[in-house]
Image: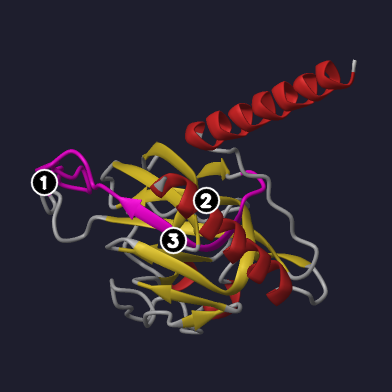
């Protein structure tokens, strides 16, 4: 019964979300390129990158900051600069939350692990607190990994690194740079999102819902059969 109630709540939330996104639909890529530091090549830069983002491209963010690779001198550090990422990445040292002012679809993105530390990585899309999709991969520093998340309508997305394995020793220059702490990080770039009106979502009924639906249909069929026998 609890699962059925939660599904009903999700349906109501989706209806409200659909009404809230009645405006024009828009698809765009969040590439963070306008967040470069603007420093001259060779100028000192902070390892921590730019300031933490609170709002950007119409979303609220936690634990995410830009890293300008054009002005970043500490290479190699697992942060690629090229066609797949451009000059600016978004980096994080902790789980990241991406929250929309209205429901949206996160279709894809590019991700990787920084500072030569591999990490188990989970991306979870939520709508009204209910999980709509979960993607789990292993990120490495060998290059950016493209992830396709499908067509799920969500209100927030969680990016959760595990920074595995525990006690992993870096291979940055000397081979024992920081023994896995404190510079474990991951990066995100080229997030393909769609917001606005006309967004649709297809949810799969939970097993309990399917059982009740099936039972209801069987009962309806039995009632019709009895009526037919009564009128024969």
Q: Quadrant of the N terminus?
A: top left
Residue underneath mark 2: 7
**Mark in the foreground, 3 or 1:** 3
Of badges 3 and 2, the one in the foreground is 2
Q: Mostly what secondary structure, the magenta segment?
A: loop
Dot 3: element: loop
**Quadrant (top left/top right/bottom left/bottom right) for the C terminus:** top right
- Segment tinted magenta in the rendering: 150-176
Q: Front-most of 204 and 42?
A: 204
Q: Residue 195, located in which quarter of the rendered image?
A: bottom right
Q: Nearer the viewer, residue 16 or 150?
A: 16
Name the residue that disc number 3 marks: 129
- Decide if residue 51 is on the left or right side of residue 101: left
Q: Is residue 37 above or below residue 6?
A: below
For residue 231, which quarter of the picture?
A: top right
Q: Earlier in the sequence, mark 3 or mark 1?
A: 3
Whether residue 143 can be seen here = no
Percent across and percent down for residue 36 are: 51, 78
Q: Quadrant of residue 205?
A: top right
> Could you tell me which residue is drawn at 32 percent across and 80 percent down?
44
Q: Secondary structure at mark 2?
A: helix
Let me know if residue 142 appears in the view: yes
Which percent across, then down, holds residue 68? 46, 71
The correct choice, above or below, for 74 with respect to 48 in the image is above
x and y percent of residue 128 in the render? 49, 63
Give the spatial CA distance, label 3 vs label 1: 41 Å
Q: Which mark is residue 76?
A: none
- Which residue is under mark 1? 176
Q: Is residue 155 left or right of residue 14?
A: left
């Amino acid at each position: 019964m609890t699962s059925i109630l939660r599904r009903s709540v999700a349906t109501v939330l989706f209806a409200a979300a659909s009404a809230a996104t009645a405006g024009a639909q828009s698809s765009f890529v969040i590439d963070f390129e306008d967040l470069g530091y603007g420093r001259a090549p060779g100028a000192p830069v902070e390892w921590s990158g730019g300031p933490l983002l609170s709002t950007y491209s119409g979303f609220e963010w936690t634990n995410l900051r830009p890293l300008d690779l054009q002005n970043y001198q500490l290479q190699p550090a697992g942060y690629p600069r090229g066609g797949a990422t451009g000059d600016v990445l978004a980096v994080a040292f902790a789980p990241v939350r991406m929250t929309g002012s209205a429901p949206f679809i996160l279709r894809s993105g590019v991700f990787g692990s920084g500072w030569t530390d591999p990490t188990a990585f989970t991306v979870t899309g939520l709508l009204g607190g209910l999980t709509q999709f979960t993607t789990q991969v292993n990120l490495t520093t060998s290059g950016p990994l493209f992830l396709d998340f499908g067509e799920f309508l969500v209100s927030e997305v969680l990016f959760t690194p595990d920074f595995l394995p525990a006690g992993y020793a870096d291979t940055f220059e000397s081979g024992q740079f920081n023994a896995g702490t404190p510079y474990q990080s991951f990066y995100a770039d080229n997030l393909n999102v769609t917001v606005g009106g006309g967004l649709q979502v297809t949810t799969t009924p939970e097993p309990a819902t399917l059982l009740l639906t099936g039972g209801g249909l069987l009962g309806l069929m039995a009632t019709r059969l009895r009526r037919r026998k009564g009128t024969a």
